[in-house]
Image: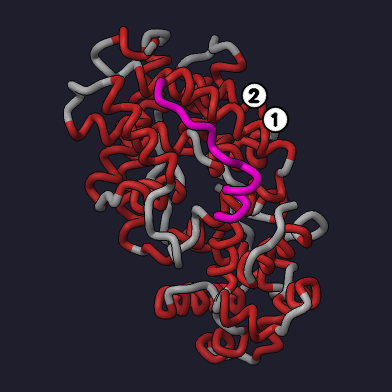
Amino acid sequence: MTVPELSGTQTAILAAYAELIEEVGSDDVSYRVIARRAGIAERTVFRNYPTRVDLLLATAAWIEATLFTREESHSIFDIPLAIRDAMQRYDERPELAHVVAETAMRGVSGAAPSPGRAHLERLLDAEVPALDPARRTAVIAALSHLDSAGTWVTFRREFGMDRRDIADAAAWAAEAVLDSIRART
Amino acid sequence: MDEPVDTATAILASAAVLLRERMFDDISYRALADEVGISERTIYRQYPTRAHLLAALSNWIEQTRFPLPPFVTVADFRAAVHERFRAFDTLPAYAYVGARASAISPTIDTEPAYITRAIEAMLDVAAPALNRRDRRRVAASLRYFSSAMFWARLRTGFDLDAGDICDAFDRAVDTVLAKIPDPAWAEA
């Protein structure tokens, strides 16, 4: 996952905004309040993030990179473990998980919805080099879909699952996807 | 376009019209008020925050543009989801609203979506002997792979069109169903 270099001021802004999102329970927080929390002038926030969408995308990327980091997987077959951990981390910060999930669903003007794609492809190619292209895409797409805040949101909202059940079901689904290539290694 | 019956619906219908030319984020309450011909205050009364508006708009779009074909068997479920993914491709701006709305912190709609219940009912018939945990794992996986989120992620993150997305969906469904002990049921 690539994270753009942030200045100290930018980090302060994003951290302040993330903190406020958790307190307010919504991303609807004014620039004035964010500036006050970060201890800087409101125009400094505007200079760094001219629009709310700019601010939201930068914040979501920062949250993913600092709070929802994954331990690096060395094999494609380790991915279910990483997904299990990620679900638990999302569950600890529900408001931030919603923000991350939502920014990935904004189409071209949103966050990259599959930030871990290249990494998954490297792992898969190393372990199962001769997979036909359509099948390879399907495996990567399914795993990258499962390894996201959207999984936590959906399992919680649609099935009322708690932390353990979400982690279990997400890891189980990832194992199901991997079963389809297990026979080929 | 259907005849709007009340203010709340008229607001959603106008928002849907504006969505054809701009992103949801760029639809201000001011512009929406002008479009409907009502005051901005009236919109705030109906939809106190943009999250409320997004959730309501998504529900309305879902009902009017992307009605889910009913399904009982797994084959019908696949066909229904294919039909939706193809419909999403013809109206991507609307489909992204649905994907976003399903990701935000719940506001009005805390009930599970109709498709969730339909998937659970389908599993009750197709795999009645399945233990409770596995049934929930299967239902949750099928639900998540059939979502607007799946379509949005594959379209934006993988540059796939509806045909490829349906293919990826079918393969994902295959892997989930393969976990169920009785292989005959999948053909139901």
Identity of the residue drawn at 48% across and 31% down: B70
Total numbered badges shown on the rendered structure:
2
Amino acid carrying label 1: it is Asp
Asked whether residue B98 is drawn in magenta, I would say no
The kind of secondary structure the magenta stretch mainly shows is loop
How busy is the neighbourhood of tag 2: few (under 14 within 10 Å), some, or many (20 plus)?
some
**Chain letter for the residue marked with disc 1 in the picture:** B
Bounds of the magenta span?
B59-73
| Foreground residue among B122 and A117 | B122
Which quadrant is home to the C terminus of chain A? top left
Mark 2 — residue?
Answer: B164
Q: Is residue B65 magenta?
A: yes
Eyeballing the image, is B117 above or below A136?
below
Q: Position of residue B17 (x, y in %)?
A: 77, 59
In terms of depth relative to the viewer, which is nearer, B31 or A146? B31
Residue A58 visible to the viewer: no
In the rendered structure, which amino acid carries the disc numbered 2?
Asp
The x and y percentages for residue A28 are 55, 77
